[in-house]
Image: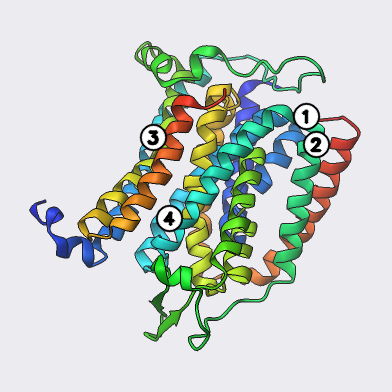
Amino acid sequence: MTLGLFTLILFCGAILAGFLGSLTGLGGGFVIIPLLTLAFGVDLRYAIGASLVTSIASSSGAAAAYLKEGITNIRIGMFLEIATTTGAVVGALVAIYLNNGFIAVLFGCVLIFSSLRTIFYKKTEADPNEKGDPLGEKLHLNSSYITREGEVVRYKVQHVLGGYSLMTLAGVLSGILGIGSGALKVLAMDTAMKIPFKVSTTTSNFMVGVTTAASAVIYLQRGYIDPGLAMPIVTGVLLGAFLGSKILPKANVRNLRLLFSVVIFIVAITMMYNGLSGKL
Amino acid sequence: MKRIFTKEFWMERDVELLIGKLLRYGVVLSCCITGVGAIFYLYQHHGVTADYSSTPAGEPFPGVDAYLRELPCILPHVLEGDGAAIIQLGVIVLIATPVIRVAFSALAFFIERDYLYVFITLLVLAIILSNIFFGLH
């Protein structure tokens, strides 16, 4: 395939990735890695490099919009970033010793987990009467936000250490796979720390950029980030994410999420099959 | 601009808006640099066949050309108008955006006199920076 045509197709794919990533909240890496490896036969390591770039672009683009609404809890984000950046550095180091087949199977597992979680997802609501974790008190993690209706919602953070450990795992996975692992981050904040849904999704998105930047540096120096792939992807993902954020308030995201989860499930099985049969 | 050094400015959440703007500028700048690089790149590699096929197991991964891996080697090639180098510069701006954002947060916490969070934020920054300089490549 000539470079011009390849770039054009990749650009369209990246627009779709950015669009679906911002509408479903799963991030663009879920589309970019299977698209490059399964459809174009690109080496998994180049795909990981491209996916890191995708994650940073979509996270920074969306974070700018979220900060305006003032729901992101910067203290929770910053505290947990100690865990995710440490994890990302460890993950990027460990990745040297892993072969493509193993990484593909691991990626498939994370995809399946994320798609199941999207299907069976229950929003966590704040319970102001519950006693918070004393450590959360010490770290000033408890806070409040104002809803669109002007109501003030206070929340207290639970199980700080449990959430911190899960975040380290999320960081390791994002260092190995080059994805934002937003689903794991939201799991740590929702299920373990009982942070309300609105705060956890925006804070998770805010953290993805910093986490992936930590491992992207290593991958750049190792030569995984290829300019020929990065070029259509950076511009395409940003354009797609922008379109997605324009449509998001009007769209019925629930059905789209379900459809996307099913597609991702099938993609995950294919990735694992190809990884095990040594085709990647 | 004078207002930027007053405590009120940082307390009133204006700082978060400033950080939001910073993120957007970083992303837009990166997108522009990459777009310019794309024009050069496509012109310079006109008619070339795209080949990113995977290396067989056991053989070392070649990766991109060595001059495209570190900022000090990339910059001279950017001045020569090398498309690939210009794109990599755009990617570096993109990677740097969230890192600079962390540095800004440290400053914001310092002006708020929240020294615990100045420490936490600088720790995050130190992990990322040590990774740049001492990381295993």
Look at discs 2 and 3 and give the one toward the viewer: 2
Question: Label 3: how many residues lie within 10 Å, few (<14), some (14-19) or many (20+)?
Answer: some
Check disc 4 and give the amino acid type: Met
**Residue furthest right as drawn:** A277
Task: Single out the mark in the foreground, 1 or 4.
Answer: 4
Q: Number of marks in the image?
A: 4
Point 57% across, 66% down: residue:
A189
Mark 4 highlights which residue?
A78
Within 10 Å of disc 4 (Cα), the crowding (few <14, some 14-19, many 20+) is many
| Label 2 secondary element | helix
Evaluate if marks 1 and 2 touch, with contact meaning CB atoms under 8 Å apart: yes
Measure how far apart labels 3 and 1 are at the Cα level.
36 Å
> Which percent across, then down, holds residue A181?
62, 51
Residue drawn at x 57%, y 42% is A88
Residue located beneath label 1 in the image: A99
Residue B58 in the figure: left or right of residue A173: right
| Distance from the alpha carbon under mark 1 to that under mark 2 | 6 Å
What residue sits 67% from the left and 15% below the top? B62
Report which residue position mark 2 lands on.
Answer: A102
Q: Are marks 2 and 3 in contact (CB under 8 Å)?
A: no
Judging by the rendered image, the residue that carries numbered circle 3 is: B32
Q: Which mark is residue B69?
A: none
